[in-house]
Image (cartoon, rainbow, N blue to C red):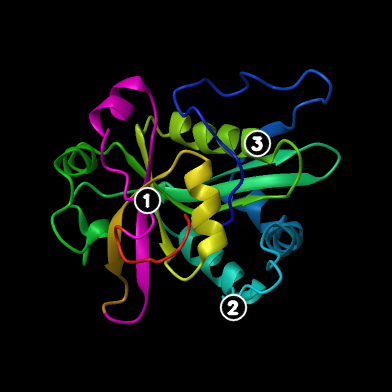
Amino acid sequence: MTAGPGRGPARKPGDGEPSAVAPARLRRLSRWLVEGLREDLVTLYAESRATPPGDPYRRPSSQNFLNRLTSDMRRPGFAMVIAETESLRGCAFGFPVGGDGSWWRDFDGALPRGIEQLTASGNVFAFTAILIRPGPQDRELARRVQERLLTHHQSSLGATLVDRADRPTLAALRSWGWLDIGELRRPAGATTFRALVLPFGERTTARLEGLVTMPGDGGDGGPSGV
């Protein structure tokens, strides 16, 4: 997942747009429309995930990204929101987390009680990818697309997994308001992921205060994106 700046998850989509630049339009896509946008999505993926100089992390290929998208599109409740001006500026997609808690399988330690309760009540949405083209408004744009998906699914918590070696993505997500709550392995033993959540709304934010794991606390050894 690729991230951009996004603060204040309790704000409403569209608030705080700079007046000097026309805000990007947000649009939710059906599976059929996503199929017709694959080429543009691959371009956005490449541009939003440019590797910083000296970064040793090897990001998944565009084909891996498309394979993941194809797999997610088959999931119940799959949804994608895109942001566009004269071109595609960003997107986010994912699916609702099942109330049985299986999405959190192999979490290291006890899952925080508040997150367990929100999962059981069907209020958690899993973000598979957040792609934002770099620019002066990328933080605000990330906030808007994230909130649009959460609002559409009436979810009060976003959740995502990031390879703990992907430090730029972790840093971006944390700057967008995501909280690092620990790690898990999926599939078991293959890759260690950091688990992050995005509270949506004042009540959920207050309920989950104190969950954030700062760099070094959870063993990722680096800063804290998707």
Q: Secondary structure at mark 2?
A: loop
Residue hosting label 1:
196
Tell me which label, 2 or 1, sits earlier in the chain: 2
Frontmost residue, 48 versus 62: 48
Residue 209 magenta-drawn? yes
- Apparent side of residue 87 relative to residue 179 in the rendered image (left or right): right
Residue hosting label 2:
56
The residue at the point 47 percent across, 31 percent down is 152
> In the rendered structure, are the residues bearing label 2 and label 3 in contact, judged by CB atoms less than 8 Å apart?
no
The residue at the point 74 percent across, 32 percent down is 24
The amino acid sitting under disc 2 is Pro
User: Where is residue 176 shown, x and y percent of the image?
Assistant: 52, 40
Within 10 Å of disc 1 (Cα), the crowding (few <14, some 14-19, many 20+) is many
Give the quadrant of the N terminus. Answer: bottom right
User: Where is residue 68 shown, x and y percent of the image?
Assistant: 52, 67
The amino acid sitting under disc 3 is Leu
Identify the magenta region: 189-216
The answer to which quarter of the image holds residue 39 is bottom right
- Apparent side of residue 201 relative to residue 32 in the rendered image (left or right): left
On the question of residue 159 being in view, the answer is yes
Q: Nearer the viewer, mark 2 or mark 1?
A: 2
The answer to which quarter of the image holds residue 115 is top left
Disc sitting over residue 141 in the figure:
3
Tell me if residue 148 comes above or below residue 169 in the rendering: above
Q: Nearer the viewer, mark 2 or mark 3?
A: 2
Frontmost residue, 210 versus 102: 210
The answer to which quarter of the image holds residue 84 is top right
Image mark count: 3
> In the rendered structure, are the residues bearing label 1 and label 3 in contact, judged by CB atoms less than 8 Å apart?
no
On the question of residue 78 being in view, the answer is no
